[in-house]
Each structure stands twice: as structure tokens, then as C-alpha cells.
Amino acid sequence: MIVFDHLTKKYGQLRAVDDLSFEVQPGRVTGFLGPNGAGKTTTLRVATALIHADGGQVMFDGKTYHSLKKPMHQIGVALEPTIFHPGRTAADHLMMLAPYAGVGRKRVKDVLDFVGLTDVAGKRVGKYSLGMRGRLNLAAALLGDPHTLLLDEPVNGLDPEGIRWIRELLQALARQGRTVLTSSHLLSEVEQTVDEVVIIAHGKLVHQGTLNELESRQTRRATLVEVEDRDSLLRLALSQGWQVRDPENPRSRGVVVEGIDPAYVSRAVYQAGLSVLQLTPVVTSGLEEVFFSLTEGQGSVR
Amino acid sequence: MIAAIRSEYRKFFSTRLWWILMLVMFAYILLFSGGVAGIFSWLETSDPETFQGTAESMRPMAYGFAPSLGYVFPAIVGALAWTNEYRHRTIVPTFLGEPRRGVVSIAKAVAGVPMGFVIGLVGTIAAVGGGAVGFAIFGFPTQLGDVETWKNAGLSVLALTIWAILGVGLGMLITSQIGVIITLLVWTQLLEGIVMLVCIAFEATRGVPKYLPGQLGAAIVGGSETAMLDPTGGLGAGDTLVWWQAALLLAGYGVVFGIVGYFVRIRRDVN
């Protein structure tokens, strides 16, 4: 189990991670989500002692990363795949890490085989594609056969086949009772992989729970209304205090009324004597919608 | 600690730059040593009257070219232990594998000793080998059977080994590869000479130059004999230190660089 305990990291005035607390349980895949710039990578770097926390701590089964004897043996970490010497072969990269993990050549060969890099193990990493680097990064994380995995955007640069492979791999590892935390800025990317999500925005926790909980958390009701006289409708909306927006379809001349029961909208439009061309309830309960609504208005680029 | 040292070796031997540097150093020293030995032997052969004893007097300098000309190479190779990691960001997996950065620092310094020794050996072979060939061609004694020659060769290896350790320390202070190279070249080729001249100009500071790194390196192998390359023409090397004092002091520079570098650079966040 990983416990993030009131973690804070400041860069000048900016609070990249802001009093963040959550727990990650073994035996399931936990998605660590948030828009770009939400503080996911910073959180993972603080957790692995690459950067100092300004407050709080991260405990792996009661121990900080820094106090672990052979951390690679217990925690596998794959951060961004830009951490290779271009002149070194994949096998040499893993061999240089092998002493830290307390493993030998046999294990290096096994993980290379496991991630499908055996044929190119003797090639310099400088010649690797982004997808191959991603696989090598994962091989390094698995080298010490750790019971906990921390992965930062592991599907980046992978082809569809690779994405499916990693999906199945993470689930298999979780089924073995391991703790798996994998980050992404796209919910759709991990939707089919994760059992639970931790969503952060601006370094703060905005949601933690299962995907089902996330889905039922917020079902937004909206009504698409199209009338002959659009201005009258807008005046009505104003007098009623409705929140309106333009419909997604730019060709539609209608107005979307948000957060109001469609039956109520219908009555109000009828009573105002507007001639209705269309009145359709719109239910937006997609996970992605919920994810956006949880993290939107936070001013970050997605 | 053993694991961290083993990892350092694997990092070192799985890249190419170090042996390219070693090859360049070998050729460079061989050229100078062989050249000096050959030219002065030839001069003495062609005009024995004017150049009486010249070849003989050039021997210590030719045989001592490894520490006097080649010391930048082991220093750069030593620094590579850090600069390579920061440049290619392999420092991330390194610190993930061993989060105790002090352990990584000590491992790199320890691993630097045999690496420096190998480079020192190669450099010294180039200096003594090149020089001996130059003298032998014109029939001058090479003194290769002499105990003194071998003692000096040993000290030459020692000097380069210590330069490698100093390089590791410098790499902790300046983690940029190009930064280390520029610092080393500017200091050794320019600043140290200027500092020496300034120090010699004043009575009170006249004793300072012998403690400067370049002078310490030369003093390990017997400073005044290689003083032709001293910009003050041997003035600064007036009274040099005993070889082991110079060796300890030069290593001390590396230790100080390393300790300062640890606190101002190595302990910092890795992004």
C-alpha cells in the first residue's frame, strides 16, 4: 500500500502539489489522472525521492523511498522515457541498473524478453523509437520484480498493440496482488485498465473512487431547445436565471439549457408562448465529461 | 556500496567516449614525447659541439609528458562519471536505484581510482615509450633499465590517477560536460599561469603557486624537471613539495570540490 500523506511541493509561489493525500491499495490498478500540469509527475518524483517535498511524505508499506535498502527490488518506477544514454544498448542499460536491483544477467535477459526487446537488445538506444524506449523503461521498472509499480504515462508513444499489451500486463500484475499506480492525462486511455481512479487538478485531490462511483457522481442534465425566435428564448432564459450555452453542433440554431429538468424547461417555453421546433433532453454522463467537469475551470491545458 | 560501485563500472565501460579520449591522449603524448626526444637527439647528433648533453637533459621532460601535458584527459574522464549522467538524464534511474546520493558519490570516486590508473598507465606508456624510441633511433641511452626511470613512471601513473579523482569531484561541482572541459582548459592553460605570475610579484604570496593544482600535479613527478611548461619559466616551482605531499594535496582539491558539489548540486532536485 502506498500512502500519500499531506504532500506539498512548491515552486516559488506555485503549489505544484498542494496538501495531497490519498492511498493506493494493492491488488488493483489505480489510475492517477489529471490534466497536463496538474502535478502528477511532480507527485511521482517526490514519492521516489528525486525531488524534495516541502511538506508531507509518501510511505510505501510504512517506509519512505529514501529509506529503502534496494528500492528497485520493492518499487518499480518508470518515469518519462528520456533517461537513456543514446550510445548504450538496451541490455547495457539494464545491466548497469542490475546491481541496484540485486539481479544478474539472467534476469536482464528475462525482462528484455518479457517486454519484447530481445531482438534489439544489442542495439544502441539512440536508434530506438519512442515505443521501444517505453518498453525498455518498463523493463527497468520490472527488473527487481517489485511488488509496487509507479508508472508515469506508460502508454505514451506505444502503438495500439502496445497499449493493449500494457493494459493486460498491468491487470495481470494487479491480480498477482501487486500495487499498481499508473498516470495519464486522458481518462479514455486508462478507462479499460483501471479499477480505481485518483483525480488531481492543480496539485489537489478532486476525486478518488471506482470508475462506477465516478460515473454516478455527476450526471448532468441539459435540454436542447430550438425555437423560431431565438432572442425571445434567450430573454426567457435570462428571466428564469437559466445557465445556457451554444449546442455542440455549430449548425444548430438551438440553445442548450443546463442543469434544469427538461420537463420544467418545456413548460416554461410553452407558457412563454414560443413556437418550439425542437426540445430534446441531453444527458451527459460520459466518464470523460465527468473528468472534464471535475478538472475544468482549473486553467490548465489539457 | 559494492552494488553502486559495480554499477559505475558498467556505466563506464558501456559508453565509448572514454576510450576515444584515451586514444587521443595516447596519440597526443606519444607525438610530443617522441617528437621532443627525436628532435633533440637529432640536434645533438648533427651538432655535438653546440648541443652537448641536450638529449640527456631532455629525458625527464619527455618521460614526464603524461602528467605535464596529458592530465586534462583523466580529469575529463573522471568528470564524465557525473556529466554523462546529467546530460543524458540517466541520473534519474541511478538515483531511483540508489536514492542515497552520498553512496552514489562515493561509489563514483572509488570507481574513478582504477579507471584513472588505467588512463595513467596508457599515458605513461605513451610518454616513456615515445621518448625511448626517439632517443634510441639516434643511439642515445634510454635509461629504461634505470630504477629512477621506473620510479618516475610510477609517479606519473599516480599523478594521472589523482587527476581522475579530482575530475570526479569537479564533475560534482560542475555537472555540465562542456562546463567541466572549459573550466579545466581555462584554469590549467590560462588562469593558473596568471595567478602564479601575480603571486610571484608579491613577497607575501610567493609561496602560494606551489599549492595550485597544476603545480601539484607536476610536483608529484618532480616539478622542476618538467618546468619547461611552467609559464613563469620555473620561478613558481622554486621549492616544490615532496611527491606524496603534492599527491595528497591534489587529491584534497578533488575531495573539496566533491563535498561542495554534493551540497550545492548533487543533493538538489532532479527534474
Image (cartoon, coloured by chain):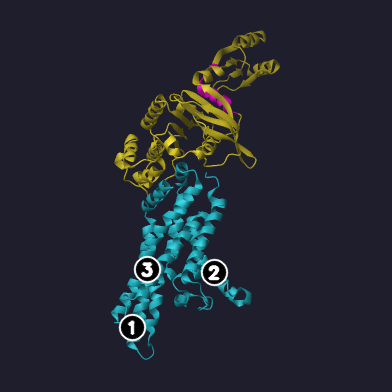
Q: Chain of mark 2?
A: B
Q: Quadrant of residue B133?
A: bottom left
Which chain can be seen in cyan?
B
**Residue type highlighted by circle 2:** Tyr
Please tell me if label 1 and label 3 are on a single chain: yes
In this figure, which residue is indicated by the disc labeled 2? B211
What residue is shown at x 52% (from left), y 76% (from top)?
Answer: B239
Whichever of callouts 1 and 2 sits on the residue coming sooner in the sequence is: 1
Q: Chain of mark 3?
A: B
Q: Are marks 3 and 2 in contact (CB under 8 Å)?
A: no
What's drawn in magenta, residue-wise? A283-296
From the viewer's perspective, is residue B171 above or below residue B222? above
Nearer to us of marks 1 and 3 is 3
Q: Secondary structure at mark 2?
A: helix
Q: Secondary structure at mark 3?
A: helix
On residue B124, which mark appears? 3
State the separation of the CA atoms marked 1 and 2.
Answer: 37 Å
Secondary structure predominantly adopted by residues drawn in magenta: helix
